[in-house]
Amino acid sequence: MTERQIEQVRRFNRIVTQHVGALEDSYLRRGRPLGQARLLHEIGPEGIEVRALRDRLKLDSGYVSRLLRALETQGLVEVRSGKGDGRVRKAFLTPKGRSERATYDTLSDELAASFLAPLDPAQRDRLVAAMAEVECLLRAGEVELRFEAADSAAAQSCLERYFGELAQRFELGFDPARSNSASVAEMTPPAGFFIVAWLDGEPVGCGALKLADAITGEIKRMWTSPSARGLGIARKVLRALEDKARETGLARLHLETNRTLSEAQALYRREGYAEVAAFNSEPYAHHWFEKRL
C-alpha cells in the first residue's frame, strides 16, 4: 500500500464520521451516543447472544457490558442468562427498546436521504454504487480463515449446507456416500487439513486439503455461503490451502468439479489450474484440474 492510499482512507473516514454524526454525544438527537444506538439495532427484534454481539461488532467484553448496562438503565434492554447454562447470556429489547429502535430506523432513513437529496439522479447512482463497492471490499477484509478440526461444529455446519446445495444444483442430486472419500480422518493432520472462513462471528465458507500421496494433494469441499458470495472467500480459502500444501512439501494439486458449478471452474482457471484428463472415477465430476506448485 502507498502513502497516498492511506491518506485517502483517512480522508474518507473523516468525512463519513462527520456526515453520520459519529462524534456527537446525542446521535440522531435521541440523547445517547452512536455506540448505544448501534447495539439497539444489532440486538434486533429476536434478541442476540452477548458473545455473538461482541464477535459481530469486534468489541471487547468490557465495553459491550458497559453499553448494555447503560441501555438496561434506560429500560431499553434486558439481559438474561441462558436456560441450563448461566454462562450464556442473551440480550433482548424491551417494548420501550423496540419502539426506540423503530424511531432510530426512521431517523436513519432521513439521514440517508439527506446524503442523496443535494445530488442529481446521476450523482445519486454514482454515490450508491460507490458505497456498495466500499461495503463489499470492507467486508472482504473482515473475513478470517482458521484451520479447524473437520468434525467441529463449524466445519460440520458448512459441510451440511454444502451437501444440501449440491443436492439442489446437480442434475441427479448429490449423495456424499457415492462421492469419492473425504472423511473426517482424511481431513485431519497429518492426512489432511480443513479450513473454515468466518465473517461476523459465523462460519461462511470452507475447504479441505487431502494428501493423496507424497507429492500430490487434493482440494476438496470448497464452498461459500450464498450470503457471503462476491467477497473473494473461495479464492482466499484456495490460496490458503495451496500455502499449506507447499508447507507440507507437495508438488501438485488435483481437484475435480461438476459441470453445473461454472463459477468454480472459472475460479480454478483464474488461479492457474489447467484442465486435464480424468485422474479418478468421481461420479459427480465432469472436469478435472491440476496445478503445479
Image (tube, rainbow, N blue to C red):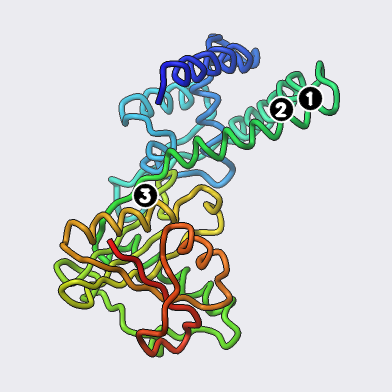
Q: Is residue 270 left or right of 193 when viewed as pictured?
A: right
Single out the mark in the foreground, 1 or 3.
1
Cα–Cα span, label 2 and label 3 = 44 Å
**Residue shown at the point (54%, 79%) measured from the top left:** 167
Mark 3 or mark 2, which is nearer the start of the sequence?
3
Say which element carries label 3. Answer: strand
Say which element carries label 1. Answer: helix
What is the quadrant of the C terminus in the image? bottom left
**Residue shown at the point (71%, 21%) measured from the top left:** 111
Of the residues shown, which amino acid type is indicated by label 1? Gln
On residue 82, the disc is: 3
Dot 1 surroundings within 10 Å: few (below 14), some, or many (20 or more)? few
Cα–Cα span, label 1 and label 3 = 49 Å
Dot 2 surroundings within 10 Å: few (below 14), some, or many (20 or more)? some
Above or below, 71 relative to 225 = above
**Residue shown at the point (48%, 78%) measured from the top left:** 287
- The image quadrant that residue 207 belongs to is bottom left
- The image quadrant that residue 2 belongs to is top left
- Closer to us: 12 or 18: 12
Residue at the disc numbered 1: 123
Of the residues shown, which amino acid type is indicated by label 2? Leu
Residue at the disc numbered 2: 127
Q: Is residue 184 left or right of 283 when viewed as pictured?
A: left
Contact check, label 1 and label 2, Cβ < 8 Å: yes
Q: Is residue 244 left or right of 125 when viewed as pictured?
A: left
Measuring from the top left, give residue 231's x and y in whole percent: 51, 47
On residue 168, the disc is: none
